[in-house]
Image (spheres, helix red, strand yellow):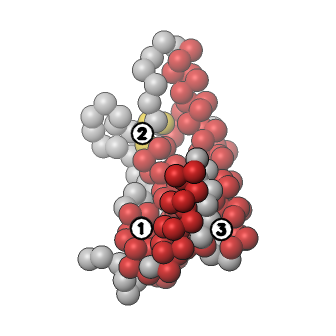
Amino acid sequence: DALRQRLVAEVLPRCREDKVFLAYLASHALANRPPLGFFRNFVLAGSGAHEGAVDLKRHGLLPIVDLARVYAMAGGVESVATLDRLEESLAAGTLSEEGAENLSAAFEFISLIRSKHQAQQLRSGGEVDNFVKPDALTAMERRHLKDSFAVIATLQDALRAAHADRLPR
């Protein structure tokens, strides 16, 4: 724990001030876009074992984790848990109240859908994965999932705009 505290004390302030580092971190947070098309339709895997499904971990949870990391580093936030990072980034002023609330709600909802999916897989004796077919969800779950993905895309777009002059090409 002493090593972690020393690292945080020495490295975190440097990260917070290093605009190039933050831009590279932002670039990483922009890599996994949510699977929504132009008209807010799901973009599904077109072939393979997961045809017709969306990867909730890669295109839902991971982008939120990455966004939370960028906002936390920019605010000098020490927490490593995603929801804590979002809350503390709000307090640090690097994330708006609406952004923090929406990303937190999206993270919790996508986590819930993923958990329900995996529990069903376990009950049926299947392999556990992160690939959910939207047709297996209720109409309300599909709407909320689209809304969650839209929140991620909006915050990614805002992050892209904030770091546009420093993003690696």
**Residue 56: image location, x then y, percent:** 49, 43
Which sits in the foreground, 168 or 145?
A: 168
Q: In the drawing, what numbered circle is on residue 89?
A: 3
The earlier-in-sequence mark between 1 and 3 is 1
The earlier-in-sequence mark between 2 and 1 is 1
Which sits in the foreground, 135 or 117?
A: 117
User: How far is the residue under mark 1 from the one under mark 3?
Assistant: 15 Å
Please state which amino acid type lies under the numbered disc 3.
Ser
Please state which amino acid type lies under the numbered disc 2.
Ala
Secondary structure of the residue carrying tag 3 is helix
Task: Answer left or right for 80 relative to 35.
Answer: right
User: How far is the residue under mark 2 from the one under mark 3?
Assistant: 32 Å
Secondary structure of the residue carrying tag 1 is helix
The residue where tag 2 is placed is 53
Task: Answer left or right for 19 relative to 91.
Answer: left
Q: Is residue 147 visible?
A: no
The earlier-in-sequence mark between 2 and 3 is 2
**Residue 65: image location, x then y, percent:** 52, 54
